[in-house]
């Protein structure tokens, strides 16, 4: 009788499997935290509710995060990591501002039920800054550092200061569309256009007209970086 060979995972494989399970649990907890925050506000996003939604105990939650804000920050860091991958994969001729525009357009195209829809990310970002104390604000602000670094790699002719200013302006433009796009019937609104991406393009076009020179690799550019 022939026997089927049994493959016993080595120590390295077992360690990798454990790490993947830990990463999956960490992500599941952070997603549950953000879903509750968006749906029920800070009052509903308690550690107990987050753990219950993720199907684990509060003790397990605390094995991964010291407090709920840690779960929110983890979610944002993972989202920023995805944006960094998109910056790195974008066509070589695309300006940093247009890369950011394309990232926002994808987020604006999602349903409000999707936690990475633009509206929900805005709520999350605002809540994180409100919930974290002054001592932890530098940690919250560092979430975007990988994105700044990715754009610096893409546009080495720009100083780190200019990259930060320009990306901050781009993020502000995206948030401004959510807050200020004209309601139906208001003068200046094209009621035939219901897609917020239309107003996102308008905001980024306005921004590009004001900052277009900053994206030129011009050896004659005046000023110091």
Image (cartoon, rainbow, N blue to C red):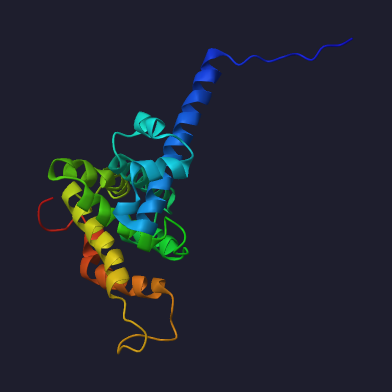
Q: Position of residue 26 (x, y in %)?
A: 42, 36
194 or 46: nearer the eye?
46
Residue 95 in view (yes/no): no
Q: Position of residue 14 (x, y in %)?
A: 54, 19
Q: Residue furthest top?
A: 1
Q: Is residue 208 above or below residue 31?
A: below
Instruction: For the N terminus, give its image quadrant.
Output: top right
On screen, residue 104 versus residue 224, left or right, reads right
Q: Residue at x 25, y 56 (%)?
A: 126
User: Total number of numbered labels?
Assistant: 0
Residue 19 in view (yes/no): yes
Q: Position of residue 67 (x, y in %)?
A: 29, 38
Q: Residue furthest right?
A: 1
On screen, residue 52 versus residue 157, left or right, reads right
Q: Residue at x 23, y 45 (%)?
A: 140
Q: Quadrant of residue 209?
A: bottom left
Q: Position of residue 103 (x, y in %)?
A: 40, 58
Q: Residue at x 57, y 14 (%)?
A: 10
On screen, residue 224 versus residue 57, left or right, reads left
163 or 182: nearer the eye?
182
């Amino acid at each position: 009788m022939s026997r089927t060979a049994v493959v016993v995972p080595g120590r390295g494989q077992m360690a990798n499997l454990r790490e993947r399970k830990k990463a999956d649990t960490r992500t599941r907890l952070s997603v549950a935290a953000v879903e509750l925050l968006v749906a029920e506000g800070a009052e509903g996003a308690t550690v107990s509710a987050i753990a219950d939604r993720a199907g684990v105990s509060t003790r397990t939650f605390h094995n991964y995060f010291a407090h709920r804000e840690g779960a929110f920050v983890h979610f944002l860091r993972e989202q920023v990591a995805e944006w960094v991958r998109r910056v790195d994969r974008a066509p070589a001729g695309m300006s940093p501002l247009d890369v950011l525009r394309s990232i926002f357009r994808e987020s604006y195209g999602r349903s409000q039920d999707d936690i990475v829809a633009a509206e929900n990310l805005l709520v999350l970002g605002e809540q994180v800054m409100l919930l974290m104390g002054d001592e932890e604000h530098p940690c919250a602000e560092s979430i975007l550092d990988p994105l700044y670094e990715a754009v610096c790699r893409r546009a080495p002719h720009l100083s780190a200061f200019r990259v930060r200013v320009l990306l901050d302006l781009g993020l502000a433009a995206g948030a401004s569309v959510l807050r200020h796009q004209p309601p139906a019937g208001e003068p200046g609104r094209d009621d035939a256009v219901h897609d917020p991406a239309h107003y996102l393009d308008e905001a980024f076009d306005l921004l590009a007209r004001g900052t277009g020179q900053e994206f030129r690799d011009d050896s004659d550019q005046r000023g110091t970086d």
